[in-house]
Amino acid sequence: MDADIALVHAPSIYDFRKRDIKLGPISDVIPSTPVFEMYPIGFISMLNSLINAGYNARICNVASMMVSSESFDPVNYLKEVKSDIYGIDLHWLPHTNGALKIARIIKELHPSSKVLLGGFSASYFADDIMANYGYIDYILKGDLQESNVVKLADAGDNFSNLEHVPNLIYRKEGKIIHNNIEYSSIDNVFLNYGLLMKNAIKYHDIKGHLPYASWLDNTEAMTVIEHGCSFNCAFCGGSNFAYKNNYNNIAPVYRKPSVIAEEISLVDEMLGAPVFITGDINQAGKKFYSSLFRELKERKVDLPLLTEYFIPPGKEYLNSLSKQFSDFTVEISPESSNEEIRNINGRSYTNKSLEDFLQNAIAAGSKKVDVYFSIGLSGQTLDDVDRDIDYSEKLMKKFTTEKEKLYTFISPITPFIDPGSLIYEHPEDYGFTITARTIGDYFNLLENGKVWTDFLNYYTKWMSVDQIARATYESEIRMIKIRQSLGLLKDQNAEHIVKNITAYMHGDAYISNENKSSHLSYIEKDVEWSYRHKLTSESFLISLYKEYNDLKKRI
């Protein structure tokens, strides 16, 4: 079946399966692999908007299929995908290489169709892309494009009414045209996993619709409470500063609690899978979270919930969360144990408030607590990283018991400082040097790099690229040994990981998963936070499909 719009997700590096690349720790603390094969959550919302408007639309997760199968041929696959418009996300910069190469392939295969880019990075570098990459026809600039992608589809077969599509950038008679920016309503956002599954069956393309490669193994859903952000983390391209200057001045807008609850209720009914609620529920205010909890309780939602926090919430909020839900997990990213460094980088709270939160979360019944630290921060030295590991050990010893588990993580800011962030725009104020500035620079970093440190677009006056790498390896070895000592990792697993990291850092042979999905420091990613699933007819079918795929691989 042909589509009006196909939403295509590319790998970070197109030929990652053929090149001998040491991808390292660049995705140790996210669900997807170093290929970044998880497509933006906005794909599901745009799919919902397009189908509800009467259009045929599909998702083609090329990256996930490339990760899952060495024999998968993306060119043959895309040749069979017929669509009037191919929408490719260039949201985060790590996809520059893959997105542009996939775009060129699509244009060669389907020259009469239109190629559309969207996302933060496409928006930030829109003029650069339109001036230098002729196979890109359109860019939708900014966030919240659910209604605008429908209006683009409305433009018709000859695309003669483009001037009526807000936020669209295109060419006309050799000139780059920027349409007026309009602020779309967040009410257009709806993450319908039920529709996603039905659409996968409609197009006989289950693998193409999977959010990421391991989704069948541990099915998880996601919802979002807001677009934009009220915080200014210095390295973040989704910060308040970045949004106001680049992405339609949304900073922030909150979704209706009833709509979020309806999304989660659909997940409960159809998938029976855990749900990650992105955005700080507590920061949205008591009225918001009380309404959300009430809406979820009225719908009798009974799923594990992963909740994240930008600053530590108080006991009142945690007790309210605990009262409503028996199975929840919390995570927070203080970035540094040094309060001054934390403040410089946009996280203004004390270690005492952090530890009070951790204590209160465990007392409230959080099944798991995750605490994230970063390497490469403004003001951070090698000694500061060592002290972060010392502090991590203190936290794990203090708060980990037989029943409750607290995990700390540490990873470098990789591979790029986000464009639009405070550091990217004012590097000298933060002690940074940014080494790449054009979309071509980023394409070439990913095209020519052989080791993950080749991709970095920065160094600081406190740490060189080599020092960032050394700090990464040494801190992760220390972190693994701490987990081993606390019984959070089996001796055999811990020794294997340490041996692997040591070989990696010295350039010796190390174990790399055949589909490039192994992670340098964690054998089983602790971010896979819940394996509790309810049996539904749809989850049963997912299980059968997984068994079928596993059998095919074994054969």
Image (spheres, rainbow, N blue to C red):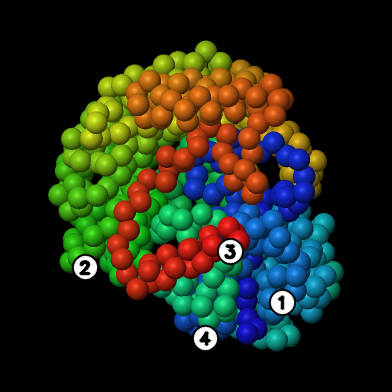
Give whichever of discs 3 and 4 has the lower sequence position: 4
Height in image: 15 above or below 521?
Answer: below
Q: Which amino acid type is marked by label 3? A: Lys
Give whichever of discs 3 and 1 has the lower sequence position: 1
Q: Secondary structure at mark 4?
A: loop
User: Are circles 3 and 4 on residues that touch, CB within 8 Å?
Assistant: no
Q: CA distance from mark 4 to mark 2?
A: 29 Å
Q: Which residue in the protein does label 1 denote?
A: 80
**Marks 1, 2: nearer the viewer:** 1
Q: Which numbered disc covers residue 54? A: 4
**Marks 3, 1: nearer the viewer:** 3
Q: Which amino acid type is marked by label 1? A: Glu
Q: Which residue in the protein does label 3 denote?
A: 552
Q: Which residue in the protein does label 2 denote?
A: 299
Q: CA distance from mark 3 to mark 4?
A: 36 Å
Q: Which amino acid type is marked by label 4? A: Gly
